Image: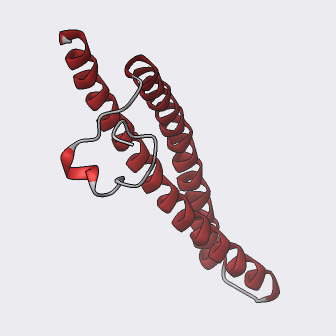
Amino acid sequence: MNENVDLEKRALEALSHYRKALAKVEALEKEEATAQQALDEWRGRIEKLTSDVVSSDARSTLIEAGQNAISRLHNIRFAMSEATAELKSALTTLVAFDDALGYLTVPEETNTNVKDAGGSPEA
């Protein structure tokens, strides 16, 4: 019995870790979409630039903005790769606790969000 209590406590910690990892991935997805939109807007300005006569200062500024947009998108995608790996690891840990216990304990504050999710021990 005491062993199950310890497993449940560790499963709750794993669930918390999974939720944090998921939130991080979701936040990075939003950042990536914003960065991609900025890059797309920059491409539109570049296309316009090729048809307009523009000073070299304006051209340099636009090129620098593009480099910054590309760098930002690269950094976000790198962070997303790391966060996704962390999420996958957290899920693997959570599945192991589910296998060991035969169920996952859902904390009271989130019980209403997953009440009809199925697979609960009460069903």
What percent of the width, then of the height, locates residue 38? 57, 71
Name the foreground residue: 115 vs 92. Answer: 115
Vertical placement of 103 versus 57: above or below? above
Q: Residue at x 77, y 80 (%)?
A: 47
Query: How many dots with numbers?
Result: 0
Pick out the residue farthest to the bottom.
52
85 relative position to 13: left or right: right
Name the residue rendered at 29%, 40% in the picture. Answer: 106
The residue at 75%/85% (across/down) is: 48
Q: Residue farthest to the right?
A: 51
Residue 53 in the image, given as x and y percentages of width and height:
75, 88
Q: Is residue 61 left or right of residue 113?
A: right
Q: Is residue 65 above or below residue 99?
A: below
Q: Is residue 42 toward the left or the right of residue 109 in the image?
A: right
Residue 71 at x, y percent in the picture = 57, 52
- Residue located farthest toward the front when viewing the structure as drawn: 123
When asked about the image quadrant of residue 50, the answer is: bottom right
Q: Quadrant of the C terminus?
A: top left
Counting from the top left corner in percent of width and height, residue 39 is at 63, 67
Q: Height in image: 115 above or below 43?
A: above
